[in-house]
Image (cartoon, grey):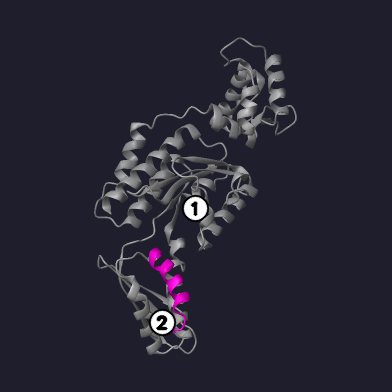
Amino acid sequence: MTETSHILSEMNQRSREVFRRVVEAYLASGDPVGSRTLSRSLSEQVSAATIRNVMQDLEYLGLLGSPHVSAGRVPTQLGLRLFVDGLLEVSELTEADRVAIDSSLESGGDTIPALLDRVGSVLSGLTQGASLVLAPKYQAPIRHVEFVSLSPDRALVVLVTADGHVENRLFTPPPGQTPADMRAAANFINAFAAGRTLTELRDIMTREISARRQELDALARALVEGGLAVWENAGQPHERLIVRGRANLLDDSRPAQDIERVRELFDDLERKRDIARFLDLTEAGDGVRVFIGSENKLFSLTGSSVVVSPYMNADRRIIGAVGVIGPTRLNYARIVPIVDYTARVVGQLLAERN
């Protein structure tokens, strides 16, 4: 039993209702909630004094806090976690939200990056938060790999896929490389490349380089390792992360220190070539996950929450994710179904395209 489920099981009906009303009122307004306000909205007639006693008990449990002396109460991070896990009533996706999401995916001629960029814009617009869309890696089977020398310290690694897609990337070759080394490296890769994806090829190359060390001289071996590393790592994760709606988190209603932390978060996301920490959010598999405040280290300094869901290909393998970042007083009841539906339709569409 988790900490929140244990606390919830110990609460009586009145405590649950008072707590739920406090959280819902706070999420709606962002303001501390007082006992007099609650006494007018509870299902049973209860005095303000009784409600104050209940709120004090909830504060003792760590579920509510008082931002100022004699002010109302606001939910703590633990309180929001308990609310999301045990008391949140998720809304049905509205027809307007469904139409907005579907229309962003309608254009069949768009590239996948352009389509996902539009999805991110729609998500940030619907939720008034910032959206994160993690695009899938391009994983078409490989037809051919080639190295092209441009100068002693600059070269291209060229990748041709089975569907005719051609891409190239600059990299720094090992010192002393020659055209013969480049041909040897390309021949070595191409002996195993045909029909395999880049990820599959990288796994095979790791084994083959070790097993055939004598057949491949040091410079050609360094070219193989460096060329594949460029395709696996250099820039691609950064390009895969689409962030939209930053301005929604940088309004004047947030404290100055929070705004600065949000700026740092976005700067960090834009600089980062390794976005494994965002991928960690979806490790648990299918379904929406909600992270509140410091529950995830990537967002712990921003006073923010993130609602995130992976999307899958036709083989039910996670290939990307969509999410929304906002203040901890997000409208979780509305945003959870929006993120869930978006992830499912994006996965469906990409599976059909492939």
Residue plotted at (45% across, 33% down): 334
Using the image as rendered, state which of residue 304 and residue 86 is in the foreground: 86
Q: Mark 2 points at which residue?
A: 155
Residue 156 position by quadrant:
bottom left
Q: Is residue 205 magenta?
A: yes
Name which of mark 1 and mark 2 comes first in the sequence.
2
Q: What span is colored magenta in the figure?
A: 199-216
Given contact means CB atoms under 8 Å apart, are the residues at marks 1 and 2 in contact? no
Q: Residues within 10 Å of mark 1 (few under 14, many from 20)?
A: some
Residue plotted at (40% across, 55% down): 135
Q: Where is residue 104 in the image (x, y as percent from the top left)?
A: 32, 46
Q: Helix or strand or loop: what does disc 1 sit on? A: helix
Q: What residue type is labelled 2?
A: Ala
Using the image as rendered, state which of residue 268 and residue 187 is in the foreground: 187
Relative to 259, residue 85 above or below:
above
**Residue 121 in view of the camera:** no
Tell me the CA gap for discs 1 and 2: 31 Å
Q: Main secondary structure of the magenta part?
A: helix
